[in-house]
Image: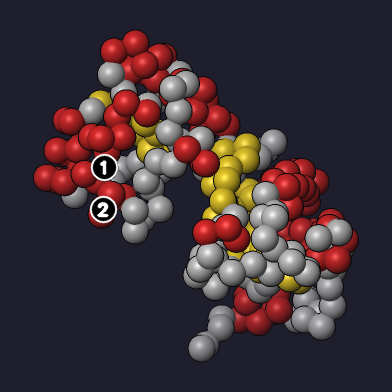
């Protein structure tokens, strides 16, 4: 696969055989982020679990102290007082059956997070086939199915991210933008790593964090020394 000159220049700065301290890795990722736009910095964590088993699932959500740098659009499924509370909290879209019709009829997906009060799950169930593959289906573990929809909206806007395993037992999660600088990214990195380590399943034996890589949208990956996390 062809890589552009900027990528090749950036790659020369990274020692692929080295496991960097998190602070050093994040500083290097910022340094190698050379695109004309503000690149997203992602954390990729390979875990020593098997996602095929229910008792080895790792999933949850955490509010990053410095946010993600992205403006988040929220869609809330709620009625009555809860709908009013969601609007007051700054939800971009609030509705019920009307929103189901809009999504299924117009193929409308102008939102980043879907939140629902528990009594709306019967309504939302009809959207499982379209929201599920996009990772947008509300889930109690992620805090997106909750009686307190207003709080969920506030947290989503503040930079709450959901982490979950893919089929290869890796978690991919944004931790901010290159413009944040290493210090702010470090605080977000620590918050996400702390949440993932806390979520270690009891069924996981042996080494939990197998490897850890940080990378910008267009830049090379930088390996982080996972042994430091005592997991």
Residue at 25% over, 26% down: 95
How far across and down, in percent of the image, does residue 224 sit? Answer: 79, 67
User: Which residue corresponds to mark 2?
Assistant: 130
Quick one: SS at disc 1?
helix
Among the 4 quarters of the image, the one containing residue 57? bottom right
Q: Is residue 79 above or below residue 223?
A: above
Among the 4 quarters of the image, the one containing residue 202? bottom right
User: Which residue corresponds to mark 1?
Assistant: 125
Quick one: SS at disc 2?
helix
Q: Is residue 144 left or right of residue 94?
A: right
How far across and down, in percent of the image, does residue 216 sit? Answer: 62, 63
Tag count in the figure? Answer: 2
How far across and down, in percent of the image, does residue 36 sit? Answer: 55, 60
Q: CA distance from mark 2 to mark 1?
A: 10 Å
Judging depth in this view, the residue of 54 and 174 nearest the camera is 54
Q: Is residue 44 left or right of residue 14?
A: left
Residue at 29% over, 29% down: 120
Q: Is residue 167 left or right of residue 174?
A: left
């Amino acid at each position: 696969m062809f890589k552009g000159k900027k990528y090749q220049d950036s790659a020369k700065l990274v020692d692929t055989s080295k496991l960097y301290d998190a602070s050093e890795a994040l500083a290097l990722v910022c340094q190698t982020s050379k695109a004309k736009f503000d690149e997203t910095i992602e954390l990729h964590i390979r875990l020593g679990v098997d996602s095929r088993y229910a008792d080895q699932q790792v999933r949850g959500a955490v509010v990053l102290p410095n946010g993600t740098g992205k403006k988040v659009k929220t869609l809330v499924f709620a009625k009555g007082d809860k709908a009013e509370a969601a609007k007051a909290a700054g939800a971009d879209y609030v509705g019920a059956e009307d929103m189901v019709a809009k999504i299924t009829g117009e193929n409308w997906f102008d939102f980043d997070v879907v939140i629902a009060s528990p009594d709306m799950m019967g309504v939302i169930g009809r959207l499982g086939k379209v929201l599920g593959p996009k990772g947008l289906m509300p889930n109690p573990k992620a805090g997106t199915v909750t009686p307190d929809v207003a709080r969920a909206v506030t947290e989503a806007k503040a930079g709450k991210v959901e982490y979950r395993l893919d089929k290869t037992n890796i978690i991919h999660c944004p931790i901010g933008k290159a413009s944040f600088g290493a210090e702010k990214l470090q605080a977000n990195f620590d918050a996400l790593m702390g949440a993932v380590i806390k979520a270690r399943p009891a069924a996981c034996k042996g080494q939990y964090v197998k490897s850890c890589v940080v990378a910008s949208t267009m830049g090379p990956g930088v390996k982080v020394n996972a042994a430091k996390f005592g997991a």
